[in-house]
Image (cartoon, rainbow, N blue to C red):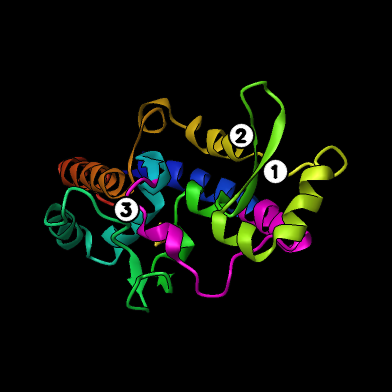
Amino acid sequence: MQRLRELSRRVEAVYGEMADTFSSYQQDSGLSCRSSCGECCTQPTIEATVLEMLPLALHLFDQGKAEQTLTQLEELPEVSGCFFYQRLSFDGKQGQCTVYQQRPSICRVFGAAGYRDKMGKTSLSVCKTIKSDKAEKYQQHLIMLTEHPPPMMMSAKEQVNELDYELGNKHYPINQALFMALEKVLFKSYYSSFSTDLQIA
Ligand code: SF4
């Protein structure tokens, strides 16, 4: 259990740097999200590794909500958006993340970030809502890619996932990744109760 806690602290340290880098780029470029927009959180295609969900799984465990959340995740339809998205409008486009501090990498880099195209050149990935809201700024930043390169989405994710090959080498739908992270935490906690290392914190 102590090893999972240490690993989670290292993931969170990278998350801290990531938040600074990506939110600075999004603020400085003007390519930031609409207030209360959560359309991306409703997509069933969001993926994360088990490692990326570890801080959230430990947070839920510490709050005594791990088993309850596992049961709720089991009852979700096979195809669904993120369990932690709270809809605030009928169509679900307005809403909020209820686990913002513990959200995984993809949620920290999504919006406006760099990626490598098929030719290996740096390009700019911008969500379709931002693109339509801020079409002119998007075009300007495409032209200025060399002078003002965006932070790269994949290298940020890799920085997290290379912290642990076993937990960071495979992506799953976000709810499934959390389910697996919770199972891991509960399993470790159960076995650590048999060892001399009874200290969870
Ligand atoms: S963790 Fe939060 S930001 Fe990420 S998809 Fe879920 S609700 Fe959205």
Which sits in the foreground, 8 or 34?
34
Tell whether label 3 touches label 1 (CB within 8 Å): no
Q: Are the residues flagged by discs 2 and 1 in contact, CB closer than 8 Å? A: yes
**Ligand 1 - quadrant of the structure image:** bottom left
The C terminus sits in image quarter: bottom left
Amino acid on which the number 1 mark rests in the picture:
Pro
Residue 68 position (above or below residue 79): below
For disc 2, the marked residue is 155
Sequence-first tag of 1 and 3: 3
Q: Is mark 1 within 8 Å of ligand 1?
A: no
User: What's the residue type where badge 3 is placed?
Assistant: Ala
Judge whether 31 appears above or below 105 on screen.
below
Q: Residues within 10 Å of mark 3 (few under 14, many from 20)?
A: many
Q: Check residue 57 in the rendering and tell me which mark sits there, or answer none.
A: 3
Question: Residue at 22% across / 64% down in the picture?
Answer: 65
185 to the left or right of 151: left
Find numbered disc 2 in the image and state the secondary structure of the residue it sits on: helix
Q: Cα distance, mark 2 to mark 3?
A: 24 Å
Q: Is residue 121 visible?
A: yes
Q: Nearer the viewer, residue 8 or 76?
A: 76
The reply to whether the magenta stretch includes residue 30 is: yes
Where residue 73 sits, quadrant-wise, is bottom left
